[in-house]
Amino acid sequence: MLAAGGIGAAFLSWYTRRPPELPIDTVCAALSALLFLAVLIRMLPGWIKEIKNPAADQPKAEENPKYAHWKAFGLFFLCLILQTALASGSRLITQYDTDFWDTFRIYVGLDSNSYLSIAKEGYGHLSAAGEMLHLVFFPGYPVLTGLFMMVIPNQVLCGFLAAWLPFLASGPVLYDLLRLDYGHRETMRILILFCLAPASVFYAYPMSESLFVLCAAGCLYLARTRRWFAAGIVGMLAAFTRSLGGLLLVPLAFEWWRQFWTENRELQPVKQGIRDACCMLLVPMGLVMYLYINFIYTGNPFIFMQYQDSNWYQHLSWFFITASTQADYAAGALLNGEQSFWGLWAPNLAVGFSSLLLMLVSGKKMRPAYSAWFPFYFAVCYGMSWLLSGPRYMAVFFPLAIAAETLPIKRKWILYIIALPLTVAYTIMFALRWSVW
């Protein structure tokens, strides 16, 4: 009732103050709000049960098969190679570039230019208006790139290393995390679906996605295996890499609660549980360090929010307003025959609605910590008033791959047939610069 009342009041307030121009805008906004509310209602009993009577984790039914970690590593390496080959091949076939090495220019555009500039020069770069716009980018990935640059003089190569190596490492880490709940076959299917996310091309891109995946998965795995101080440190790095890293507090809180109430008090005394809880407070320290960087350079720890609003028209809003805005632009782009409909607006809408539908159907089957993480993650991602990168943001949220694998479909290969052409199409649109961000 609280959720319905809050979302309903926000929707009515927005609709009465700024009614959408087109009927499709209202439909998309209402559908987004209703689906989100339906997810909350469907997940709520599981969350209450987890809070009132958490069940102890069961040991794995089977040991890891031989070379399991290498298989996960190989799968993620294959993903990087195929995505890079597809993007470069698309540019060569369409004659955007005539030389293979020239195709890599696509990988040093967009936001990667800013990340690489931060790695080389810090945040001191001024825009034409005298603003330090690079402050809107979190420092985790540039710091890692800068460490590579201390021994390798090629800036672009260091950018690739800082993206590829964390992604390759995240394969075995994700495998170990998923194996705590699933068998080997199910885990490998989840990893395949994760690699087939529509925006998986950004795993190979010199930006922060891959490092965030590694830190998020590593943080949760360490917490699940009761190494809370290490989990707090790695979670702090996730929050230092992306603002969404701070939301790891949600699944961590669920995991701590389960461990605290199911552990043998003789083996895990209350004092230990309190210390573990304190370790979680390390996670938001990553955000605090980022705010401190803003303060050092400008004297205002929240200057990045001002820059986001004035230069990229982004501020935190309601996710259903984003759906309405995107529907409005999608309709205009479609009527005018613009490529942005296919590369930008349609994928953002499709990923937003499909994420909600996936969690509505399968979210109840997954671990409560993951299903509780989703509404916070989605609300922040799709709460950006001028959202351009929804598919990229949701690609790193691995519980969506779990939800896809647990769909009530007997022949799981059907999921690959559905996902593969979408991934290929999105990668090609990215390579040809059809407004994919």
Image (tube, grey):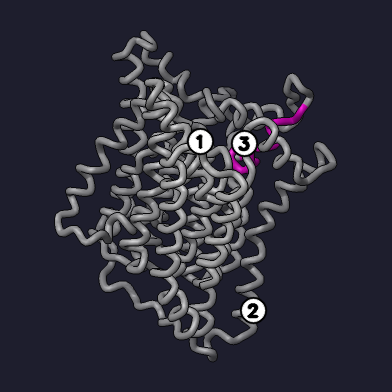
Q: Is residue 343 left or right of residue 378?
A: left
In the image, farthest residue toward the right? 299
Pick whichever, 34 or 314, lies toward us: 34
What's under tag 2, amino acid-wise?
Answer: Ile
Task: Classify 10 Å Cα crowding around label 2: few (below 14), some (14-19), many (20 and above).
Answer: few
Residue 285 included in the magenta stretch of the image: no
Prevailing SS of the magenta stretch: helix
Earlier-in-chain disc, 3 versus 1: 3
Residue designated by label 3: 142
The structure residue drawn at horizontal position 61% and vertical position 52%, both measured from the top left corner, is: 239
The structure residue drawn at horizontal position 56% and vertical position 37%, both measured from the top left corner, is: 386
Residue designated by label 2: 274
Residue designated by label 1: 388
Label 2, label 3: how far apart the Cα atoms are: 34 Å
Label 1, label 2: how far apart the Cα atoms are: 41 Å
The quadrant holding residue 345 is top left
Task: Classify 10 Å Cα crowding around label 1: few (below 14), some (14-19), many (20 and above).
Answer: many
Pick whichever, 192 or 362, lies toward us: 362
Tell me the magenta residue range.
131-143
Decide: is 104 above or below 167: above
What's under tag 1, amino acid-wise?
Answer: Leu
